[in-house]
Amino acid sequence: GKRRGSKNARLPEKVLWMRRMRVLRRLLKKYRDAKKIDKHLYHELYLLAKGNRFKTKRVLTEAIHKMKGEKVRDDKMKTVAETRKLRARNARDRKSKRAEERTRRAQETAADDTA
């Protein structure tokens, strides 16, 4: 037999697109319901899928794992930065207290010397 009709007439691109969107959206819903992704990441990935960023389910799952890893790394960096800021603030406070103590002692000794 011969092929009659264009590729798009035989299997429309729209049908392929709808199948792909349904597969990707189903996966995103499943991950959201299973609490694997939060609603913010879900929404971001939903819009990326709609914008033709992910060709297959596998590409989408890889992107999810990558984004989750980045989120964990960012959270870890934030906690490290917070602890460093707190440590620096405490060191500054201790240093200023020591300086105040020194100036107070110097003033007391100066007052004792004049008296």
Image (cartoon, helix red, strand yellow):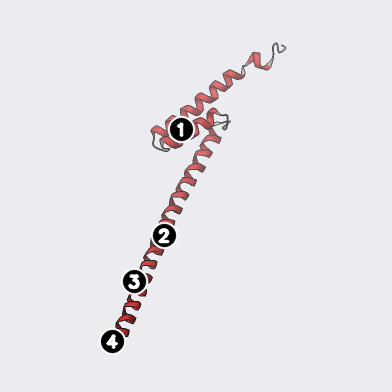
Mark 3–mark 1 Cα distance, whole angstroms, equals: 50 Å
Instruction: Please name the residue that numbered disc 2 is placed on.
Output: 85
Q: Is residue 115 above or below residue 19?
A: below
Residue 112 is labelled as 4
The structure residue drawn at horizontal position 47% and vertical position 49%, both measured from the top left corner, is 74
Q: Name the amino acid, label 2.
A: Lys
Residue under pointer 3:
97
Sooner in the amino-acid sequence: mark 1 or mark 4: 1
Instruction: Identify the residue position indicated by label 1 in the image.
Output: 43
Asked whether disc 4 touches disc 2, contact meaning CB atoms under 8 Å apart, the reply is no
Q: Residue at x 53, y 35 (%)?
A: 60
Q: What is the secondary structure assignment of the residue under circle 1?
A: helix
The amino acid type, in three-letter code, at marker 3 is Lys
Helix, strand or loop status at disc 4: helix
3D distance between C-alphas at marks 2 and 1: 33 Å
Pointers 3 and 1 in contact (C-beta within 8 Å) = no
Residue at 39% x, 35% y: name it: 34
Locate residue 85: give its quadrant. Answer: bottom left
